[in-house]
Amino acid sequence: MSHSTSLSPEFAASLQEIKTLRVYPEGSSLFERDAPADGFYLLEFGRVRMLYPTPMGWQVFSIRDKRGEVLGLAEVMSREAFRVTAKASERTGAYFVQRDKFLKLLNGSPDLRLQVLGILSGDLDSLYDAYRNVRWKPGRPRALEKRTITNLQE
């Protein structure tokens, strides 16, 4: 994905009281696909691979490594399970923001709700760009070129 989903300084400051730093060793999961989305994550340091399963194994579709990037916000807002797995590629620190506390914070702030909408819109733009740049291989339905997605053998 080309778009970096990060919070504005004002938004980040509003989360100060409700976020908790968690540190993940290399190879551990921040969250797993199909697990309940009980909160979202703000990357503080390290690198996270965003993975999804395919019949050929796990596929990486995004690597996040910028401080302040938001992981899992769409699932929190939609009250759905996580759609992907997020794994630390190296020692990684991420702030966890619990869903119920976050939604309570949003109820009192129209400005924050607009910023969430902007973040989610940016995510949608990124997904569209990634989809548009995918090249389908003839003879193999829905198979992607290796330059777009890296196959991980696990």
Image: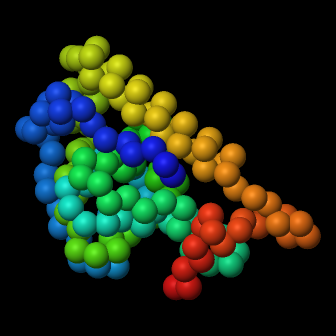
Q: Is residue 75 visible?
A: no
Q: Give residue 49's position: percent from left, percent from top.
A: 42, 66
Residue occupying the far bottom of the picture: 154
Q: Quadrant of residue 120?
A: top left
Q: Is residue 40 above or below residue 90?
A: above
Residue occupying the far left of the picture: 17
Q: Is residue 30 above or below residue 36?
A: below
Q: Give residue 58's position: percent from left, percent from top.
A: 57, 74
Between 140 and 109, which is closer to the camera in this rendering? 140
Q: Is residue 125 visible?
A: yes
Q: Is residue 8 toward the left or the right of residue 128 in the image?
A: left
Applied colour scheme: rainbow
Residue occupying the far top of the picture: 110
Q: Is residue 15 above or below residue 139?
A: above
Q: Residue at x 33, y 25 (%)?
A: 115
Q: Is residue 5 toward the left or the right of residue 44 in the image?
A: right
Q: Give residue 77's position: percent from left, percent from top.
A: 41, 35
Q: Residue at x 62, y 41 (%)?
A: 128
Q: Quadrant of residue 87?
A: bottom left
Q: Is residue 131 toward the left or the right of residue 32 in the image?
A: right
Q: Residue at x 10, y 39 (%)?
A: 16
Between 111 and 4, which is closer to the camera in this rendering? 4
